[in-house]
Image (cartoon, coloured by chain):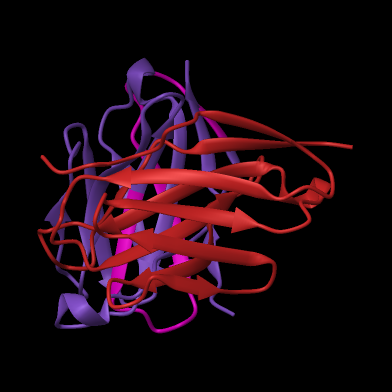
Amino acid sequence: GESVGLHLPTLSVQEGDNSIINCAYSNSASDYFIWYKQESGKGPQFIIDIRSNMDKRQGQRVTVLLNKTVKHLSLQIAATQPGDSAVYFCAEPDSGGYQKVTFGIGTKLQVIP
Amino acid sequence: DVKVTQSSRYLVKRTGEKVFLECVQDMDHENMFWYRQDPGLGLRLIYFSYDVKMKEKGDIPEGYSVSREKKERFSLILESASTNQTSMYLCASSLLRGHRRSFQPQHFGDGTRLSIL
């Protein structure tokens, strides 16, 4: 079936640098995407979402970019901090409805002090 | 903020036991979900519920059942625990919207790490 995936399983970034986490999706009909952050020992935490009628959405230090042409989205974290160390998941609604979601495997972000 | 509370952070049970995992949410969400999370496999949906007393199978329902007697509470039951059910279990909830275009994100609890010996 359709799935959501990630290019890089682990990303190491120097503190203060910007981080970019990528995600490819295969369902061209997907119209909504979500990014989650999961810190060690905790459940996934909603960060930001974007709908397909947008190319870019900004939050606090985070920006999500959506390229529907190549079915790719990215999460950019500005001035990465040690507290950003976590696993990041992208997700999209499942075509089956009922608000089900398909999650990617995740990318581990390691911030080097 | 949405609060999803799972009753136990860590649980150790024996093979063959009947195990109950409890989840409560305080935001009047219609949807509730149970996932398990395993290294390299990501989050996999076990069961979900979109209303009281309603339940739907997810991707890996075998060996599990659920109960939703009240809107705020969703229980996962391992009928006869086996070692391959050792995992991190995550509960989530979300608002119900009738159309996909008004999809609402899921909010998660902090998980129950279950070990079956």
Count how many numbered circles sit on residues in the image: 0
Quadrant housing residue A67 = bottom left
Q: Position of residue B63 (x, y in %)?
A: 21, 32
Residue at 26% over, 66% down: B68
Instruction: Looking at the picture, tell me which residue is in the foreground, B95 or B53.
Output: B95
Residue at 23% over, 60% down: A100
Q: In the shown orientation, is residue B86 left or right of residue B104?
A: right
Q: In the shown orientation, is residue B7 left or right of residue B15?
A: right
Instruction: Looking at the picture, tell me which residue is in the foreground, A73 or A82.
Output: A73
Residue range of the region highlighted in magenta in the rendering: B11-34
Q: Position of residue B42 (x, y in %)?
A: 39, 35
Q: Position of residue A93 (x, y in %)?
A: 24, 61
Q: Visible in this render: residue B14?
A: yes
Residue at 45% over, 62% down: A65
Colour that chain A carries in the picture: red
Q: Is residue B19 magenta?
A: yes
Looking at this rendering, what residue extends furthest in the right direction?
A113
Q: Does the magenta stretch include residue B49?
A: no
Q: Is residue A44 above or below residue A106?
A: below
Colour that chain B carries in the picture: purple
Residue at 17% over, 70% down: B53
Q: Where is residue B46 in the image (x, y as percent from the top left)?
A: 25, 44
Q: In the shown orientation, is residue B81 left or right of residue A62?
A: left
In which quadrant will I find the N terminus of chain B?
bottom right
Q: Visible in this render: residue B110?
A: no
Quadrant housing residue A3 = top left
